[in-house]
Amino acid sequence: MSSKSGILQAFAITIMAATAPAAYAQTASIKIAVPVEPANIDGCNTTVNGINLIVKENIVETLTVLDPNDSKVLPRLATKWEDTGNGVWRVTLRDGVTFHDGKPLNADAVVKAVERMQSTGVTCLDRTKIANVKLTAKSIDDKTLELKADPAQVLMPVFLSFIGVVGPDTSPTQLSRAPVGTGPYQFVSWNADGVQLKRNDGYWGKKPEVENATFVFRGESALRAAMVKTGEADIAYSISPQDADDPKMDKAFLNGETTRIRFIMQPPLDDIRIRQALNLGFDRGALVGTVFSDEVVPATQFILPKINGYNPDLKVWPYDPKQAMKLVQEAKTAGVPVDRPIRLIGRTNFFPNQGEALQAIQQMWQQIGLNVKIEMMESAEWLKLVNKPYPAERSAMMIQEMHDNNNGDAAFTMYFRYHSKGQQSEMNNPQVDGLIDKAMAETGAQRTKDFQEANRIIATDVIPAVPMYHMVSQMRVGPRVNYMPNALSTVQFELSDITMTKK
Amino acid sequence: MAHQILSTPLADAPMPENRFKIILGMLWRDKFAFTATIILLVTILSAILGPWLFGDAAIVMNLRARNAPPFDLSRGFAFILGGDSLGRSILARIALASQTTMLIAAATVFCSLVAGTVLGLVAGYRGGLLGEAIMRVTDIIMSFPSLLMALVILYVFSPAISNVIIVLAITRIPLYLRTTRAEVMEVRTRMFVVAAEVTGASTFRLVFKHILPIIAPTLLTIMTLDFAFVMLAEASLSFLGLGVQAPDVTWGAMVAEGRAYLSKAWWLSFWPGLAIALVTMSLNLLSNWLRIATDPLQRWRLEKPETQNV
Amino acid sequence: MGSYLSKRAVWSGISLFLLVVMVFFMARLTGSPADLYLPIDAPNSMREEFARLHGFDQPVLVQFFTFLRGLVMLDFGESLRQNRPALALVLEAMPTTLLLAFYSIAIALIVAVVTGALAAWRPNSIFDRIATLLSLIGASLPNFWIAIVGVLVFAVGLEWLPTSGTGSVAQWILPVAVLAIRPCGLIVQIARSSMISVLSAAYVKTARAKGAKSRRIIFVHALRNAMLPVITVAGDQAAGIINGAVIVETIFGFPGIGKLMIDSITYRDFAVIQAGVMVTAIAIFMLNVVIDIAYAILDPRIRMN
């Protein structure tokens, strides 16, 4: 077996050597297979899936980072931050940091990066995270700056983790495909062979082990898995459960994504009994370990337990088809049009095996006596349905959704989804509105408590959705490297965390 | 193709009274064609009887039988080909899918054949400005890769069965059209057609009596192959997520769904793939036989029992 | 010939123009790129700003005239996704696909014509039966299926070939093979049936009976006559190879036009779709001209008028 894998490895290296002679001459070169080629790898898109894997904290660093386990804010390029009142925060920068092009990291550079991110001349997507806030940066001295948020933000330290500090010479009108930052890796090239990075030997922090990293883009899960198996790649992202058949290499981790099925509350979905019945009639346990990985966790709300504002007292809906049928019957007697078709809308290429999951769920709901029809939509069409302004005439629909809140606080979910003014909200509940408004301005235990209360009301009194699962990602890690994925690995993949296996 | 000059008048020779028996005999003599007929009959029967035969086995999921391996009778005969990723009987699903598959393939091939042949006849026979216009529209269709065109159209309209048929039919028209036109232009110059033209035969009669029979064999071959093409194009659309949508199912969609399990449960995509291949092959063998059987110069191969034809 | 070509060019120009117009409006019917480019939690103000920045807030007709103005200068605009000129992206991707298509079709054509002709020489012989069977199997397998099975068998199982990538010769073998299988299967069928027709003609039969020497002459002669439908189908397959390329390039990570086009359709990158359609259309038009010329050479009765 060992001689076989030796030959295999030699073979793989020969192939790779032909592709990228420079990158694979040494052993500390790795290849990562990811599903989608990003549009750009700009440092002001560090919150965008696919871009962040490559650029965030590898090439371009942010002012702060979040701890993957408890979402605590940790220093990165900023070493200190304090609230000086009136929405103004004073941020102190790390000493002795230079950009890959040799320019020093100073307050001016950060001011420039903040301005670029907010400019309308270039579509920086990190801006969506601070959408309704105006940030003004002012340099105080070489290593100190003031950031003013309007309106004032209690979550400023988290906001700092959205601010990628790109080199001062980055184009103010174009999204970059060759970013310059301060990170431990430096951009080399982007061509048919993928995106190549090399170690930045002038890095301020600890010197990472991996010298060269190449990201390649392969759409099929089976192929990515095969690449690691044959030694062509060292790490493969998003392996579907059926391809993750090697316990030695495959690692499952909660990826921060939560799925649910949202109700458009038109008859019969405007009746709470029907919404309860749909929750009771969904056997969440049946899909675990079959259609989905056995590590997915049935959800009670749209955020993960590690997020501030998660309500731990909520219980997962039990599977009780009898009760569900009873509720449907009751509603029918009360004149609710339960026979009316309900569209169950899925989006193509959301997560592995979703087609099967939807078919299974549809069948469970057929069995409790509801007329559910699946419709698959491609993303653009799907997006038209989920965002306000909604069309005047809407039919009863259930829309499959997936949401990631990796930012530590419920605020990034609650307003948007549950406040009556939220852009994707189906709710109009004054009590919830009040709690969300209140919590957003608070800090500490009271903030947590108010968000938790809002989540309780939403989950038990309003029921705007069928919560599904906290999803997992499967990553395949080959024998040449050591890497243990964490809760943030799908959005922040630090090459510095990878070590080479000792021979 | 000079023989067809001779063959055309003969093609109308009266057949003996017991035609059916003779055709059957001719079929029996070509064992491949015979097998092919049986396969096609079974397919048609399963399309009609499948739902009745298997009841809900094609629809009701049973996660305990998820990816159940084939040739295991412990779950009953319905699971002889194994279970799919939701534990439904693959055999039953193939039977159920044969309906939609046949509907899409037949409707698409028929539409594109009729439209393509008619337009091709016009373009080839009349020529002129109209012919040129037809050819240029064909160029437009051909110059936009059909799969991408189908995607764009299905993005605009929803991927319903009827839309899938229309989209696929449009993309297949040029093949028939160009083939017909090329053959017509060639046939036109032949002696008997020229003669008929000179003697004042009507265009309609000329086309249907003299030209169509000659180009029919080629069209038939293309048609049978196109049947497979449509099933596959439909599978490609499913692969890209825009084919037939659940709960409707086709063989192509089954292959596309099953491909995710190829390393673990090959039977999910193998059996529907085999069904596509078998039907394609049968149609092709049958069309070969048909061509021989309708060709007076070759018919002897099937008529005399002592002839070795394998 | 010269007048034929110039006339053809004029007609082609008209159809190209119609095609581009059609694609322009079709693409815009498929939805707004603003929804796709911005994250799902982007506020509407940002969507509007994005639309403004890229001119999608203008009425479609105004957008169309802007587009036409650019078209005259061969400027298709900038890719939304990559912020680079659309035409440059397309021209960069073109050679990969052209090579892929050329190898596939050339291999398919050579293998298929030889196999088909030999099979037709003695219809229903063992060789014919096997050739027919194999070609039919080849023609009835979906290419994504062949691709994945190919990877599992040749890369994972046998470890003969790399799974994907574009750098080395070995990496081209699987994609080219996957692309060639279907056209090859089809052309075998067409070549065979067309050859049978020709060979069963009375004059050929007499000649065949005469002996080996004339048999070879006849074979070559008949082959020439039988090529007409083969050329039609081969041309159709060559034009259709982009379809296969879409799938093959996506699976194997080839930076070709198929992958570029499907990505730009998915992301509503209109400028790239338009440039891509234009360039592929020109390539296919040229292919068709070649086919027509091939017709004329093979069959002098078809005059170019």
Image (cartoon, rainbow, N blue to C red):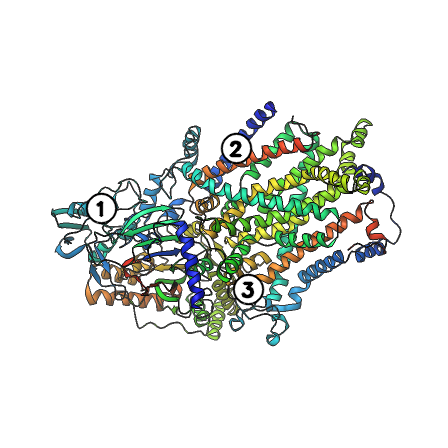
Mark 2 and mark 1: Cα distance apart in space: 45 Å
Residue at label 2? C16
Residue contact between numbered discs 2 and 1, judged by CB atoms under 8 Å:
no
Q: Position of residue C118 (x, y in %)?
A: 70, 47
Asked if marks 1 and 3 fall on the same chain, the answer is: no
| Helix, strand or loop for disc 2 | helix
C42 w.r.t. C152: above or below: above
Q: Which residue occupies the foreground of this view, A17 or C64?
A: A17
Q: Please give the chain letter of the residue carrying mark 3.
A: B
Left or right: C50 in relation to A331: left
Image quadrant assignment for residue A14: bottom left
The residue lying furthest to the top in this view is C3
C162 w.r.t. B126: above or below: below
At label 3, the amino acid type is Trp
Left or right: C56 in relation to A128: right
Q: Please give the chain letter of the residue carrying mark 2.
A: C
* Residue located at (76% from left, 50% from top): B290
| Number of the label disc, if any, that sits on residue B266 | 3
At label 1, the amino acid type is Ala
At label 2, the amino acid type is Leu
Between disc 1 and disc 3, the foreground one is 3
Q: Position of residue B117 (x, y in %)?
A: 68, 40
Between disc 2 and disc 3, the foreground one is 3
Residue at label 1? A113
